[in-house]
Image (spheres, rainbow, N blue to C red):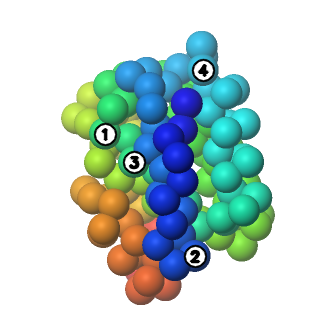
Amino acid sequence: MLTSVETVGDVAIVGANVDQLDIGNSADFKEAASAILEQHPKLVLDMHRVQFIDSSGCGALLATLKHAIALKGDLKICAVTKPVHTVLDMIRMHRICDIVETRQAAVEAFAKGRQNGNG
């Protein structure tokens, strides 16, 4: 579900290792993300493989963000494909979570102290 954890300082970077984030795997995603957040509350999620996301997948992202915040961390999303970006734009995810182009930009956003989409 989520690829191995790469760390840069206190930030964990993981890739979503699925083509779809939907009702069929959103519970597994939340479980995997939760386990990572317990060790690394600052999480970068690379979504370059994900081509489809439904409301359950969006809910899983929101649950992950909420969990990260509860642990005094945050979630940054990067490398979002065009179809997924369209859905995230529709639900205005960018208003509560940083969505950036690259892993490096996401890590830099943490380094600059940007949390929860606030600059």
Measuring from the top left, give residue 56's x and y in whole percent: 59, 25
Which residue in the structure is indicated by mark 4?
25
Q: Quadrant of the C terminus?
A: bottom left
Task: Of the two numbered discs 4 and 2 on the same chain, state the one appearing first in sequence.
Answer: 2
Tag 4: residue type? Asn
Q: How many marks?
A: 4
Q: What is the C-alpha distance between the residues marked 4 and 2?
A: 27 Å
Q: Give the mark toward the camera: 1 or 2.
A: 2
The answer to whether residue 110 of the structure is visible from this angle is yes
- Res 46 label: 3
Q: Camera-side residue: 22 or 49?
A: 49
Measuring from the top left, give residue 76's x and y in whole percent: 46, 60
Label 1: state its secondary structure: loop
Task: Of the two numbered discs 3 and 4 on the same chain, state the one appearing first in sequence.
Answer: 4
Q: Give the mark toward the camera: 4 or 2.
A: 2
Q: Residue at x 40, y 71 (%)?
A: 107
Which residue in the structure is indicated by mark 2?
10
Answer left or right for 37 relative to 92.
right
Label 2: state its secondary structure: loop
Measuring from the top left, give residue 83's x and y in whole percent: 27, 29
- Res 48 label: 1
> Mark 1: few, some, or many residues within 10 Å (few <14, many ≥20)?
many
Q: Quadrant of residue 102?
A: bottom left
Judged from this view, the residue extending furthest toward the bottom is 112
> Mark 2: few, some, or many residues within 10 Å (few <14, many ≥20)?
some
- Circles 4 and 1: CB atoms closer than 8 Å: no
- Res 67 label: none
- Circles 1 and 3: CB atoms closer than 8 Å: yes
Measuring from the top left, give residue 22's x and y in whole percent: 53, 20
Q: Residue at x 73, y 48 (%)?
A: 35
Tag 3: residue type? Asp
